[in-house]
């Protein structure tokens, strides 16, 4: 196995960039004419990677989400890495949304990706699940390039990165 080449498939999000985007969004909420008196709030728990959005209506909440999405895109954060839950009624006729930053590949997605790579039937290509990442091995670097190209074409609902290519 020492002669095999490999790379890792990971799903990582830079939480510092997410935190910076959140701070910019809060600042814009206080300054933007149509949002500053709306009593909309956006909180971010950096340790858990969770957002809590409270707004007087779903329309205002969508506007706040759009502002946050714009800030995230400007900081090169893929929007697939942010999952918002269903709106829930809160006190005083307000609406609350909970959002989560998705990082890491869970077991279900890892097995799906592994199965998809095996279904390619590339010679001597193996996939190994290692916690929240997958390692793909092959004697042929061309096979690894084919796997990367194939995975980039697929939509797994969260951003994937390919690193440690050796």
Image (cartoon, rainbow, N blue to C red):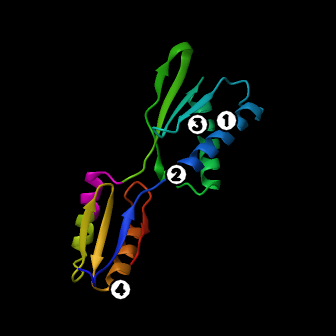
Magenta part, dominant SS = helix
Please give the label number shown on residue 62: 3
- Report the mark closest to the observer, 2 or 1: 1
- Mark-to-mark CA distance, 1 and 4: 47 Å
Instruction: Give the mark nearest the N terminus, 1 or 4.
Output: 1
> Residue at (52%, 39%) from the top-left corner?
46
CA gap, disc 3 and disc 4: 44 Å
From mark 1 to mark 3, how far is it between C-alphas?
A: 15 Å
Q: Element type at marker 1?
A: helix
Which mark is drawn over residue 100?
none
Q: Earlier in the sequence, mark 2 or mark 4?
A: 2
Q: Is residue 79 left or right of residue 160?
A: right
The residue beneath circle 1 is 26
**Residue on which disc 2 sits:** 79
124 relative position to 141: left or right: left
Range covered by the magenta-colored residues: 105-113
Where, quadrant-wise, is the N terminus in this rendering?
bottom left
């Amino acid at each position: 196995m020492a002669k095999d080449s490999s790379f890792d498939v990971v799903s990582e999000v830079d939480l510092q960039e997410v935190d910076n985007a959140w701070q910019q969004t809060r600042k814009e909420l206080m300054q933007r004419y149509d949002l500053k008196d709306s009593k909309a709030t956006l909180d971010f728990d950096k340790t858990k990677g969770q957002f809590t959005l409270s707004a007087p209506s779903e329309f205002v909440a969508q506007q706040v989400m759009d502002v946050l999405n714009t800030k995230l895109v400007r900081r090169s954060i893929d929007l697939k890495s942010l999952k918002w839950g269903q709106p829930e009624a809160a006190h005083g006729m307000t609406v609350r949304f909970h959002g989560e930053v998705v990082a890491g590949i869970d077991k279900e997605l890892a097995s799906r990706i592994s199965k998809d790579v095996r279904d390619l039937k590339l010679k001597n290509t193996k996939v190994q699940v290692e916690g929240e990442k997958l390692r793909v091995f092959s004697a042929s670097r061309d096979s690894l390039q084919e796997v990367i190209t194939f995975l980039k074409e697929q939509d797994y609902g969260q951003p994937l990165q390919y690193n440690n290519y050796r």
